[in-house]
Image (cartoon, rainbow, N blue to C red):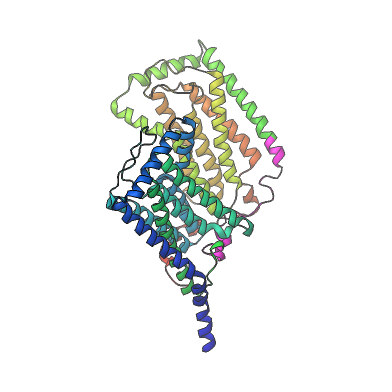
Amino acid sequence: MSAVKEVLRRPLGHFTERTLAGLALVLGTGVGFGLLLVLVRVRWTPLYDVDHGVAAWLNDLIAPHGPLVTVLNALTDLGGRAVIIWLVSVAVIGLLIRRQGRLAVFLIVTGLGALILDPALKTLVDRLRPEVEVPIGAYAGNSFPSGHALGSFVAYGALLLVFLPAMSRRWRKPAIALVGTLVFLIGLTRIALGVHFVSDVLGAWLLGAAWLGVTGYAFRLWRVERGRRVPSLTEGLEPEAAHEVAPAPDEAHLLPHPRAAVFELLVGWVLVLGVLYGFGMFVSYHAGGTFFATLDTDVPRWFAEHRTPGRDDVSYWWSKAGDTHAILLISLVFCPLVLAVWRRWRPVLFVALAMFGELSLFLASAAAVDRPRPPVGNLDGPMPTSSFPSGHIAATICVWLAVTLIVFPRTDRWWRWIFVALAVIMPVGVAVSRMYRGMHHPTDFMGAILLSALWIGLLYWVVRPNEDLREGNRPAIESEQIGELDDELAKAGRVD
């Protein structure tokens, strides 16, 4: 009996030894945040002077340099709510697919805590944002603490703790340093753009460290209750889950013959561009008196004559389904799910090359052909690119066709046909909306089909995104088990 008690005491002893310093750090950051909160609330003069002095100095230094402001805005977006929610949501879904419910719960609780603390404290403190001579960033709401700084600290820190076990030991410390640098730079951009004071960012970091420390401490207690050892910080939260949280197994070569594949894709890209250029020049400038000319004249006029306010609204939203943001969102959701379920990089490479190739071919052919928009009133105003081919339609075809080609052969469930339907319905809807709004000729639609068919066909032949199926690869969760994902969160709270 004494031996059993000793075994049970051992995890608790290790926990106490390893986390005493961490607990002191958590308490210290909490006290530091509380003190800073009081100083901000009472407007302590030395802090007030530093905050406003630094804000004015940085505004004078940065405002005259447009390119620098662009870089700062790009960096600050990495701490924005949209990016943070996407990262955490995709990670949670992937962890549930990999049956790592406890880690998913950790991310959900940690992320929700940051989302609650930020607006609550801003309302409590009710501090106005900096007033600078040359405003270079416009943000609504109160100032203390910085939501970007808090969100980035908590989200990137939590993701790092979850996925550290998937990294080899020699990469863990560089990964910690990289995440720390990113969080620091995001906080710095908030001050440099003149939307937060120094104390706003420092307060957010202290609060983020305290909250992440509390949730990490709770997770370590969770491990003790399950009789598992308490790992060091550099091992992550759940070292035993290293295989499950790894995106995909290491592969010696992503493609069997990468140099030959690069050559084939480059040559193919040039040939596809040549076909697009030839067809585009013909229908744009040399098709007078042909069926193509009649089609390009009559269809835009017919759409323009049948416009109504209701149809204008519907066409606007259909058109948005093919813009850069929508297509990027689809890709950024689909690719992590592919990694979570099938554990292979090649399908992700296929989707990434599909979108990159489509964009580059569209821009190059549009610049070369330089076709004017249809001679009817367009509803979207001046565009930076010419009419042929339609980038919206080509991107929609490419992304949904690529998704369908990956999903359809990988499952026998009925819902695979939904992707086939989307690969038809989405491009047709976007095409009709673009022509209705006076942005494209019917032959621009044909050009988009030509671009998509040739490029996706070439990629499928070179990349072979479903090659792993021939090697016997199966999903992390079989199709008949997909319904079980709903139970993962409930199971996460149970002791093994």
Vertical side of 184 occupied by 133: above or below: above
**Is residue 465 visible to us here?**
yes
**Residue at 55% over, 66% down:** 232
Residue 404: where, in percent of width, then height? 52, 42
**Residue at 44% over, 47% down:** 187
Is 377 in the magenta? Answer: no
Residue 341: where, in percent of width, then height? 53, 54
Q: Nearer the viewer, residue 459 or 481?
A: 459
Q: Nearer the viewer, residue 84 or 407?
A: 84
Vertical side of 459 occupied by 84: above or below: below
Residue 58: where, in percent of width, then height? 43, 38
Is 254 in the magenta? Answer: yes
Q: Quadrant of residue 29?
A: bottom left
Vertical side of 318 occupied by 482: above or below: below
Residue 390: where, in percent of width, then height? 49, 26
**Is residue 477 visible to us here?**
no
Task: Point out the stretch of residues depicted in magenta.
Answer: 235-262
Apparent side of residue 207 relative to residue 275 in the rendered image (left or right): left
Q: Nearer the viewer, residue 254 or 483?
A: 254
